[in-house]
Image (cartoon, coloured by chain):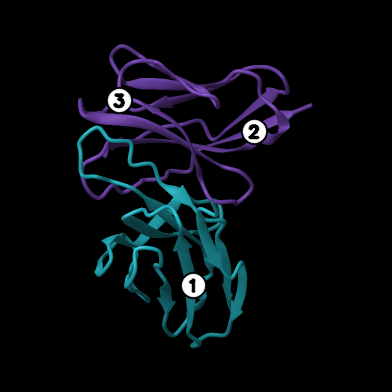
Chain colours: A purple, B cyan
Amino acid sequence: DAKTTQPPSMDCAEGRAANLPCNHSTISGNEYVYWYRQIHSQGPQYIIHGLKNNETNEMASLIITEDRKSSTLILPHATLRDTAVYYCIVRVAGGGFQKLVFGTGTRLLVSP
Amino acid sequence: NAGVTQTPKFRILKIGQSMTLQCTQDMNHNYMYWYRQDPGMGLKLIYYSVGAGITDKGEVPNGYNVSRSTTEDFPLRLELAAPSQTSVYFCASSYSRGLAGAKNIQYFGAGTRLSVL
């Protein structure tokens, strides 16, 4: 699996958009970008994933650059409950056994 | 739908004691996983299972054992507990039909916080 690089921490004001960057310059053509988050030591929670097109769901949007070497997770209107550690993970989708390689992620603090 | 359920939530063990961490899922997932998370660190894979009767080692299997007799249950056994096993343990499950491009999203339990003193 390709390695990812994320800033250790970010701040965001409540109601504003939170943009979390991730670098994955060694990503392979068949590897997807996945985002998970972990709220206050709870179990990680899946947010979104994508291959090369931008993706949006009820939780967030994922923007992947054209060369696929970096991506940005966007929380459009951050709330206090979005305070969490966000993990960017690159992995091959589907197939058989899949190991999730968690780094240290980005600690997002949403303030009033 | 309960999802992935782990018990107990907290446990304190003495050095040398043994215990079993329970994990059950009600989503009929074929894959199950055990991770540990040390303070300030990411998760590390201990063991995983691709179906009933099939288990394999992850990155940090030493000091642990698992079994998978049913689709729903995947207990983690600690033999001769050591202080280095103080950690938060997460169980997860996912569904894979073995097709390339499929989501294979992992769903996690709430964790078991274990202290070995």
Identified by mark 3, the residue type is Ser
Above or below residue B63? Residue A111 is: above
Residue A25 has which mark? 3
**Residue at the (37%, 34%) spot, across then down:** A4
Badge 2 local density, few (<14 within 10 Å), some, or many (20+)? Answer: many
Secondary structure type for disc 3: loop
Q: Which residue is mark 1?
A: B21
> What is the chain identity of the residue bearing mark 3?
A
Q: Nearer the viewer, mark 3 or mark 2?
A: 2
Q: Which quarter of the rendering shows the C terminus of chain B?
A: bottom right
Secondary structure type for disc 2: helix
Q: How many marks?
A: 3
Query: Mark 3 to mark 2: distance in Å?
Result: 27 Å
Residue A82 has which mark? 2
Above or below residue B13? Residue B109 is: above
Q: Could you confirm whether marks 1 and 2 are on the same chain? A: no
Above or below residue A7? Residue B91 is: below
Are the residues at dot 1 and dot 2 in contact (C-beta closer than 8 Å)?
no
Q: Earlier in the sequence, mark 3 or mark 2?
A: 3
Of residues B30 and A12, the one nearer the viewer is: B30
> Is residue A63 found left or right of A74 in the rendered image?
left
Where's residue A88, x and y in %?
Answer: 43, 34
**Residue at the (34%, 15%) spot, across then down:** A53
Where's residue B7, x and y in %?
Answer: 56, 69
Classify residue A78 by image quadrant.
Answer: top right
Identified by mark 1, the residue type is Leu
